[in-house]
Amino acid sequence: MITSKVVFILAAILIIAVLLFLVIILTKKSPARLDVERYRIDWLKIEQKLKRDDVSSYHLCVLNGDKLVDRALKERGVKGATMGERMKNSKDTWTSRNNIWGAHKLRNRIAHESDVSVGYDDARRALASFKQALKDLGAI
C-alpha cells in the first residue's frame, strides 16, 4: 500500500520538476526582437542616398548597408568578434549566402583599398544583397 507520505514525496518531486522545467524554459535566451520600423527607416535612408551621378555615394551606401546588417546580427545575439565571424555563425540564415558574402567583400575592398573602383550597378547589387540579408534576419 502506498502511504500518504510516499504520495506527498512523489507530488513534491513532480512539482519541483515542473518548476525547474519552467525556470529553464523561461530563462532560455531567445534571439532578440528587432525594431523593424527603425530598421526600415534606416534602410530607406541608405537606399535614397545612392545616386547614379554621385560616385562617392556608391561607397558610402555599401559601407552603411554592411554596417546595418552587422548591427542586426549583433542585436540578434549572433556570436563573433567580426562581422565575418557573425555571418559564418548564422550561415543557415541566408537566402543567398554567396550574395551577402560578395557584398561584404565589396565593403571590405572599399574600406581597405584606396584605389577600389565601384560602379553604380555593383553598388545596387550589394544593396540588394544587404536588403535580402536584413529580410532574412527579420529586420525589415
Image (cartoon, grey):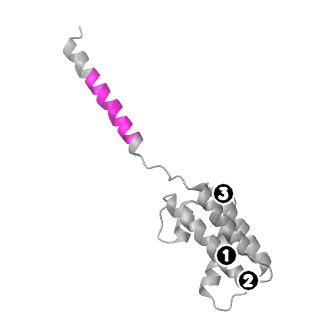
Q: Write the residue at 53% across / 65% down.
A: 86
Q: Quadrant of residue 44?
A: bottom right
The residue range painted magenta reads 11-25
Crowdedness near tag 1: few (<14), some (14–19) or many (≥20) residues, C-alpha within 10 Å: many
Q: Which image quarter holds the N terminus?
A: top left
The mark nearer the N terminus, 3 or 2, is: 2
Q: In front here: 12 or 98?
A: 12
Instruction: Name which residue type carries label 3.
Output: Lys
Residue placed under numbered mark 1 in the picture: 62
Q: Secondary structure at mark 2?
A: loop
Residue placed under numbered mark 3 in the picture: 135
Residue 123: where, in percent of width, then height? Answer: 73, 76
Instruction: Name which residue type carries label 1.
Output: Val
Residue 21 part of the magenta segment: yes
Q: Where is 21 relative to 33, above or below?
A: above
Q: In front here: 91 or 56?
A: 56
Classify residue 89 as left or right of residue 24. Answer: right
